[in-house]
Amino acid sequence: MSAAAVQTARGLDLEARGHAMHALAERLFPLHRSQTGDGLRRTLAEIGREVAMEVREIPSGTRVFDWEVPDEWTLRAAYVADGEGRRVIDAARSNLHVVAYSRPVRARMPWRTLRDRVHTLPDRPAWIPYRTAYGRDEWGFCLDHATWKALDREPDREYEVVIDATLAPGAMTVGEIVLPGAGDGEGLLWAHACHPSLANDNLSGIVVAAELARWLGERERRLTWRIVFAPATIGAIAWLWSRGDAVERIRAGLVLALLGGSGGFTYKRSRRGDAGVDRAAAHVLAGSGEAYEIRPFEPFGYDERQFCSPGFDLPVGRLTRTPHGEFPEYHTSADDLAFARPEDLAGSWAVAADIVACVEGNVTLRATKPYGEPRLDVHGLYAGQGGADDGGAAIRRAAAWVLNQSDGGRDLLAVAERAGLPFDAVRRAADVLIETRLLAEETGRSHDRKETP
Ligand code: ZN
């Protein structure tokens, strides 16, 4: 992509954006997020201080398609203390120390009884793993293996084991930023918000989504954009269940996750494989100068599984850097704030913003004077645009392509692909040609519109 095009979406303040996103991640990092509960609520409230957000509570027990909204988990304390009251494991030191959704426990037991309840990573003895007990009547702790081994030397030593938690009917919290657009289509940006104290998974997705919301909020919009923060899986299913009206209008969407780390980008196509967002992502990444890989859809991964389930089959892809399970820090305490650096976040935001800008600007046009080339000078084009400078030449080249290819059947992205030009150059040429009435928008054409039977 040309420097000019990159600059359009990314702005000159990329470095400042990177630091702003990292600062938000720092504020969110200590909050104890889970599928439900106050950590999730406080996370959404903190994001809502930056961009106005609608927060909804979906009651426990609500049937959502084949699923049910879980009971709310509230944790007050979780620790293992020795005979002197010294806490050898304490969730106050790291949220990862307690298995999420552990049922309450208050007992005394020797280490040989407790040891199998304490999860470690023997291959990474300094790291604490992240574990959940969603939907299971369990409890447990997570610990670095080095400490576990030290405790394991005295199997008969007695410990006080406390998980002071409540698992009871409450609600699951979902946050949604809605930015109305001029047209009737919608765009979706989605970040899972249920993980505690892990920076890449998924504070990176959360802060990039929040920054995209702030940026989109300051732009004119064709699509209405919904930026949603919710627990993975059950949050996506409940959102789809409760937002049938919006779902019908979705023309493009991105699941945003794992956007920290220094790895290259991975775009996972929608189930359709050739949706506008798939083409936009491929076009932007090809011109980004970044290392990247494009993968086909598969029914594994993050919330694209729900958006791309057959009943919805939405045009929603997934943008990550290195995917889950493919970097050693995944779901461990090593996925910390140093792992998602400001420059990684800034680069991720820039790619995501370029894809969003491409989706926003991609319309199908029709030349109003298609018989022979129109006489551009007669239509007052380029008279005041210098003409000698490089920008003028580039836009004339893009204009020639747009005029030639806009027969009502090709969208602007197809024009850019065929011309080998950055989308932004084609879009800017189109804007000039629309203004001079040499092009008109072809309404009602979008192959990403959900077909109604
Ligand atoms: Zn995860």
Image: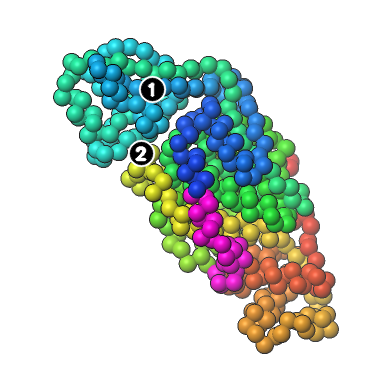
Q: Mark 2 = which residue?
A: 332
Q: Mark 1 = which residue?
A: 78
- Residue drawn where x is 64% and y is 64% of the image: 413
Q: Is residue 350 above or below residue 29?
A: below
| Spot occupied by residue 365 in the image (x, y as percentages of width and height) | 75, 65
Q: Who is closer to the viewer here, 95 or 59?
A: 95
Q: Are marks 1 and 2 in contact (CB under 8 Å)?
A: no
Mark-to-mark CA distance, 1 and 2: 18 Å
In the image, what residue type sits under mark 2?
Thr
What is the chief secondary structure element of the magenta stretch? helix
- First in residue order: circle 1 vs circle 2: 1
Q: Is residue 202 above or below residue 355?
A: above
Q: Who is closer to the viewer here, 284 or 230?
A: 230
Residue 357 in sight here:
yes
Which range is magenta? 1-22
Q: Is residue 69 above or below residue 364?
A: above
Instruction: In the displayed orientation, state which residue is furthest to the bottom.
Output: 388
| Spot occupied by residue 160 in the image (x, y as percentages of width and height) | 30, 15
Within 10 angstroms of label 2, few (less than 14), some, or many (20 or more) residues? many
Give the side of residue 256 with respect to residue 59, left or right: left
Q: Quadrant of the C terminus?
A: top right
Q: Who is closer to the viewer here, 200 or 321?
A: 200
- Residue drawn where x is 33% and y is 45% of the image: 328
Query: Element type at marker 1?
Result: strand
Give the image quarter of residue 149.
top left
Q: Quadrant of the N terminus?
A: bottom right
Instruction: In the displayed orientation, state which residue is furthest to the left.
Output: 153
